[in-house]
Amino acid sequence: MENFRERFDNLQIDITCKLTVLILNSKVKSKFVFGTALPINTLGYVELTLLDGKLIFIDGLGLHYDVDVHYNIDTLIDIIEGFDF
C-alpha cells in the first residue's frame, strides 16, 4: 500500500510532466529565453518555461525562479487547469 509521501511524490511528478508537455506544445515564444513558454499572470510571474530541462518561472524583468523553490502545488494545478484544453 502506498503511503502519503509516495502519493505526494507521484503527484509532483505528474504535475511536472504535464507542465513540461504544455510548455513544449505551446505556440508562445518566450520573451526572455530561447524556446516556448506558458504566459501566466500569477505571483508576479509572467512566464513559465523550461531552461536546461527545469521548470522556471520568469518575472516581468526577465529574472528566473526555480519552480522547485518558488511554488505551491495549488498554483501549479491552477496553471495546468488554465491551459489544459
Image (cartoon, rainbow, N blue to C red):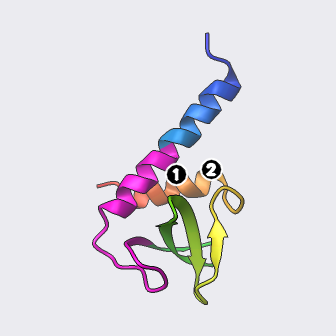
In this rendering, the answer to whether 46 lies above or below 15 is: below
Which residue is outermost to the top?
1
Quick check: 4 above or below 16?
above
Residue 22, magenta (yes or no) = yes
Residue numbers of the magenta segment:
15-38
Q: Which residue is mark 2?
A: 73
Q: Position of residue 64 (x, y in %)?
A: 62, 76
For badge 2, the amino acid type reads Ile
Q: Quadrant of the N terminus?
A: top right
34 left or right, relative to 66: left
Q: Which residue is mark 1?
A: 77
* Residue drawn at x 60%, y 52% as measured from the top left: 74
Image location of residue 49, percent across then percent down: 48, 68
Q: Quadrant of the C terminus?
A: bottom left
Label 2–label 1 contact, CB within 8 A: yes
Residue 24 location in percent, x, y? Answer: 34, 61
CA distance separating discs 2 and 1: 6 Å
Give whichever of 85, 20 is nearer the camera: 20
Query: Quick check: 19 above or below 56?
Result: above
Q: Secondary structure at mark 2?
A: helix
- Within the magenta stretch, is there residue 37? yes
